Image (tube, helix red, strand yellow):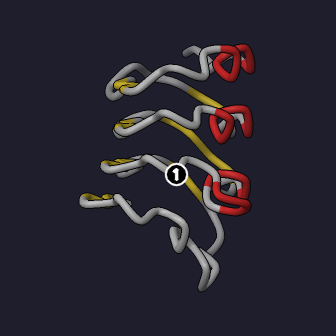
Amino acid sequence: SYFIPTEIGNVPSLKRLHLQDNKLLGPLPSEISSLSMLEVLDLSRNYFFSQIPNLLWQAGGLPNLEHLDLSYNLFTGSLPSDFGVSWQQLRTLRL
């Protein structure tokens, strides 16, 4: 199993991140929220656990996000009522 390194936040121009089916493990690094150009985030079919970091949707995080797939993981907790409010471009959401 592997982790997403926190250095992922050092690639702010990244538009698509497809890491589905990679046996990735652990909590999502909050540094993903600094990927301001990100349009597609597919982390489905991995072993991510804990809560989805608030930074992903708060304070305008990921403003260009169109597709989010976090399905088939091990996340815990419930989503707050403001989940995804800042994602004006969002077309697909899979949890």
Q: How many marks?
A: 1
Q: For this view, does 72 lie left or right of residue 47?
A: left
Quadrant, the N terminus = top right
The residue under the point 40% across, 26% down is: 15
- Closest to the observer: 44 or 53? 53
Tag 1 residue: 63
Q: Regarding mark 1 in the picture, which secondary structure is present there?
A: loop
**Image quadrant where residue 33 sits:** top right
Dot 1 crowding, Cα within 10 Å, few <14, some 14–19, many 20+: many
Of all residues, the one furthest to the left in this rendering is 91
Task: Classify residue 52 as left or right of residue 19.
Answer: right
Spot occupied by residue 92 in the image (x, y as percentages of width and height): 25, 58
| Rendered residue at 61%/60% (across/down) | 57
The image shows residue 17 at horizontal and vertical percentages of: 40, 25
x and y percentages locating residue 81 in the rendered image: 60, 85
Point out the residue furthest to the bottom here: 81
| Residue beneath the point at 57% across and 37% down | 36
| Residue depicted at 41% across the width and 48% down the height | 65
Quadrant in the picture for the C terminus? bottom left
> Label 1 sits on what residue type?
Pro
State whether residue 33 is above or below residue 10.
Answer: below
* Residue 13 x, y percent position in the rendering: 52, 20
